[in-house]
Image (cartoon, coloured by chain):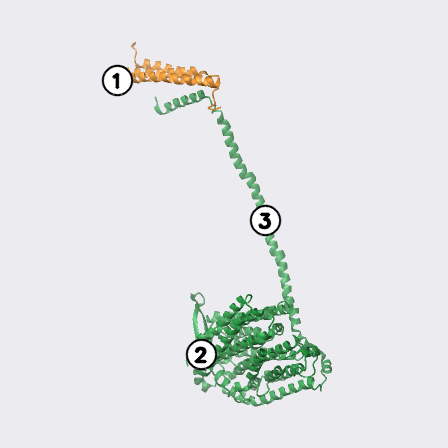
Chain colours: A orange, B green
Amino acid sequence: MTSIGLQHYLVVSSILFSLGLFGIVTRKNAVMVLMGIELILNSANINFVAFARYGNFGFDGQLIALFVVILAAAEAAVALAIVLNIYKNFSTVNVDEIDKLKE
Amino acid sequence: MNGSNLITLSLFILFAPLVGFWFTLILGKKVEKSYLIEIVISTLVLLTTIYVTFTKLFYFPDTKFVSEFTWINLGEMPLLGKVTVELGMMIDNITALMLFVVALISSLVHYYSIEYMKGDKRYNRYFAFLGIFTFSMMGIVLTHNILMMYIFWELVGLSSYLLIGFWFEKDSASDASKKAFLVNRIGDLGMFAGILLIFVNYHTFTFDKIFMAIGNGVLPFNSEFWLTIVGILLFCGAIGKSAQFPLHVWLPDAMEGPTPVSALIHAATMVAAGVYLVARIFPMMTGDALLFVAVIGALSAFIPATIALTQTDIKKVLAYSTISQLGYMIMALGVGSFAFGFFHLVTHAFFKAGLFLGAGSVIHAMHHEQDIMKMGGLRKKLPVTYYTFLIFCLAISGVPLTSGFLTKDGILAGTFAFGLLTGNSIFAITGFFVAMLTAFYMFRILILTFHGKPQDEHKYEHAHESPFLMIAPLVLLAILSIFIFYTANPFNADSGWVLSNWIKTPASVVPEHARYSFMVPEKMQEAAVKTTEHITHSEVYTEALHHAHIPAVLLSLVLAGLGILLAFAFYQWKKIDVDALTLKVKPLYTFSLNKWYFDEFYHKTFVSGLLGISNILAWFDNYVVDGIVNGAASVTRMLSRFSGVFDNYVVDGAVNLTATFSGLIGLAFRKLQTGKVQAYVVLVVFSLVLLLLFFVKI
C-alpha cells in the first residue's frame, strides 16, 4: 500500500495545525503569532482540498480553499497594520507586554 | 282632659334645664346676660310643671302614666335568661308632687339668686349649675326604673359638688365639696350593690316589674333575708344622699356653698331624694328592713337636733335641723307611716327652703355675717324677713295652723301607733323629744337674730331690707306654709285632699309573714285587698292611728310650746342664765358644740386608716411592684448583653469568615487570570481537546 490517500493529507494538515498552534502559543513576537495563524489557516485549506478530492463533495472544498486564501491575504494586511500601530504605541511587539486597552 | 300629653310635657320639664345649662355655660364667658336664658327656661319649666302636676292630681289622681322604650336588648344570656334594659318615665301622684316642689323651689331660688349673687365673678356659671341640678333632680323624680334613677342620683351628686365648691378659692369650700362627694359615694356604693342584686335576681331595673316579681313570690336567692338585705342596701343610697346617720357629716359642711344653693339642694330637694327613694322602694321593704330604716331615721332625728342646740352659725343650725327633719321623714317611712313621711317631705321643702332663703336675706343684709351671736335686733331692719322667718319657725316647730303641724303631728301619731301595736315605743319617745328640741333651737336662732339688742352696732346700722326679688320668694313660701293649701281642717290632715286623694300608701308586695304584722290585711278583707293597689294597713293600724291622733296632737303641742317657752326664757327674757347653765353641764355642752366629735372620730378611724392603708400600698408599690419591674429590666439587660456578645462574635464571625473565605478563593484563582493571551489560548485549546475527548468519543 504505497499510494498516497486521505490519511496522509490529514496527518500533514494535523502537523501543520499543531505547528501553527505551537507558534501562536510560544512566540512572543506578534508577527510570529500571525505567522502561526497563517499555518493554521493553511492546515485547514489542506483539509478542505483533501476532503474535496477524496469525499463526494464536488468542487465545494476547492472553492472554500480559494476563499480562505483570499481571506488570509486580507487578514494579513489588516493584522500587520494593527501590529504596526501597536509598535507605534508600545514600542514593542511582544504580546506579553501589550496588556492595556487604553492609556 | 287628655292625659297623654303629660309624658311629652314632662320630657320638656326634664330636658329644658339641660339645654339651659349648656347655653348658659357656653355663652357665659362672652355674653354677660346669658343667665337670662336659664331664668326664662326655669320659668317655663315651672309653668309646665304646674300644668302637669295639677292635671295629674285633679283629673287623673288614680292613673299611673308610664312610657318606656327598650334601651338594650341582649336577648338570651347564659345564666341570666332573657335580658332587656328599659328606660322610661313614670308619673304618679308622688312624682307629680315632687315635680311641683322641685320646679317651684328651683325657680324661686333662680329669682332670689339674681339679687343674692349679684357681683359674683362667676355669675353665669352659677346659673348654669343650677340648671344641671334641676335637670338631674327632675330625672330622679320622673324615672320609672332604678338604673336611670342611679344615673341621675350621681348627677345630682355632681351638681351638689359643683355648687358646694362654687367659691373654690376658699379652702373650706373646696374641702367641703370633696367631703360631700366622697361621703355620698359610700352610700351610693351600697345602693349600687343593691341594684346589682336586684338585676341578678329579677333581670330588670323597672320598679313595677320588680314589685310584680316579688308579689308573685320570687325572692332574691329564694330567701326573705336577702330581700331585707337588698332593701337595706338600696336604703344606703338614701343614707348618703339624705345625710342620715352615720353619713350625715357632709351636710353641715356643705353650707360653704352659696345660701340659695343650700336652700335648693341641701334643704328642700336633693337631700329629700333619699326620702323619695325610700318611698319608691317602699312596697318591697320587709319588716326588718323598715325597722332598720326607722332606727336610722330616729338616730338622725335625735343626734343633729342635740347638736343644733349649741351651734352659733345660722346656716349650720339650719343644716342640722334639716338632717333632723329628714330623719323624721325616714323614721315615718320606717314605721310604716308612708303618707305622712312623704307629706312631710313636701311641706318641709317649702318651709325649710324659706328658712334658708330668710337666713340668706339676713346674711346679705349683715354683709356675710353668719354668727347669730353677732346679730340681734334685726326685726326692725328686716321686717318682711322677720315675719316670714317667724312663720317658717312656727311651721317647723309644729304649731297649729301651719303645714308643719299637719305633717309632723301625723308622723308623731304614726310612731305612737307603731308603739301601741308593737310595744316598741322608742320611736315615739324620740319623735316627741326631738319635736321639743326643734322648737327650742329654731326659736333660739329666731330670738338671737331678730330680737334683743344688736350685738354689732356697726353692721346693724348698715343692715337693710333685701330687694324685692329676694323678698317675694320668702313671702310665697310663707304662704305655702299655711295649712289651707293641704287640708280644710287645720287639726287633722286625714280628710284633706293631699292625703285622701293624692298620697296613698302603696301596697306592700313582701310575703305576709315578712311584713310588720299590722301591714297584713285581715283575712276577710283579703279578696277585696288584692284588687286595689293602695292598701297596706290593716284595720288595726288605722284604728291605732285614730287612737294615737289626739294624744299625739296634745303631747306634741305641749312639747313644742315647752320648747318655744324655754327658748324665750333663755334668750328673750333672760330668766335663766344661759352661761351658768352651760357651765353646769359643761361636758354635755362641749360634746354638742363639737358635734359629738363625729368628724374627729371619722378622721381618727376611717381617714387615718385609709391613709395608713395607702402608705402600706405605696410601700408595696415602691418596693415590691417597682422591684419586680426593675428586676425584669435587669434580667432583660443581661439577656441583651449576652445577645450582644453572640451577635459580635458568632454572627459577625460567620459573616467575616465568609468574606475571608471568598478572599482566599480569589487569591487562588487570581493566578489563573494572567492577562496573557497565549495562556488563555492554551487553556481554550486544552479545554477543547478535553471536550472533544468527552463528547466526540473517537
Tell me which residue sits at (51%, 27%) in the image: B667
Question: Disc 2 residue type?
Answer: Lys
| Dot 1 amino acid type | Gly
For label 1, the SS is loop
| Circle 2 or circle 3, nearest the eye | 2
Question: Which chain does the residue under circle 2 lie in?
Answer: B
Q: Which mark is residue B64?
A: 2
**Labels 2 and 1 within one chain:** no
User: As displayed, is residue B569 above or below residue B143?
Assistant: below
Q: Is residue B65 above or below residue B665?
A: below
Between B143 and B15, the one nearer to me in the picture: B15
Name the residue that disc number 1 marks: A58
Q: Position of residue B37 (x, y in %)?
A: 52, 71
Q: Nearer the viewer, mark 1 or mark 3?
A: 1
- State the residue position of label 3: B635
Q: Specify which label sits upstream in the sequence, 2 or 3.
A: 2
Crowding around mark 2 (Cα neighbors within 10 Å: few <14, some 14 to 19, many 20+) is few
Quarter of the image with the N terminus of chain A in it: top left
Residue at image x 51%, y 74%?
A: B40
Q: Residue B84 location, x and y as percent?
A: 44, 69
Front in this rendered view, residue B35 or B612: B35
Q: Say which chain tag 3 marks.
A: B
Q: CA distance from mark 1 to mark 3?
A: 93 Å
